[in-house]
Image: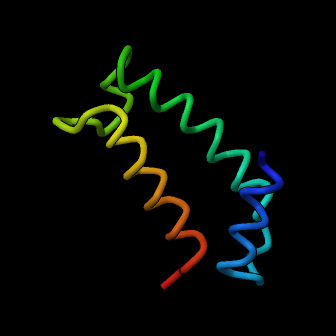
Amino acid sequence: MCNKISEVMLSLNPSYTYSRSLSSTLIETAHSQQYFSKNLPRLTDVSNEKEEDFVFNFLSQLVFSALNPV
């Protein structure tokens, strides 16, 4: 799965150096943030969003910021 995500990332930005690391971080962080959102919300910025929406929005911003730096 990480390899497939890495390939998608590289299709968006072929010069991105850390696609495999980012893809594995993405999967691990998705699990961690879901757990933290439900059980330890002070470790997250979940606020009033549903946990799933928060995790999706956070990871989307993380990935696209990394792939498309300003």
Residue 23, position in %: x, y?
71, 53
Taking the image as shown, residue 24 lies to the left or right of residue 52, namely right
Quarter of the image that includes the N terminus? top right
25 to 16, vertically: above or below: above
Taking the image as shown, residue 22 lies to the left or right of residue 17, namely left
Q: Between residues 50 and 16, which one lies in front from this camera angle? A: 50
55 to 38, vertically: above or below: below
Q: Residue at x 30, y 39 (%)?
A: 45
Q: Residue at x 51, y 69 (%)?
A: 64
Q: Residue at x 72, y 57 (%)?
A: 5
21 to 44, vertically: above or below: below
Residue 8, position in %: x, y?
70, 67
Task: Tell which residue pokes out farthest to the left in this image.
Answer: 48
Residue 44, position in %: x, y?
36, 34
Taking the image as shown, residue 25 lies to the left or right of residue 50, namely right
Residue 26, position in %: x, y?
62, 47
Q: What's the image's color scheme? A: rainbow
Image quadrant of residue 11? Answer: bottom right
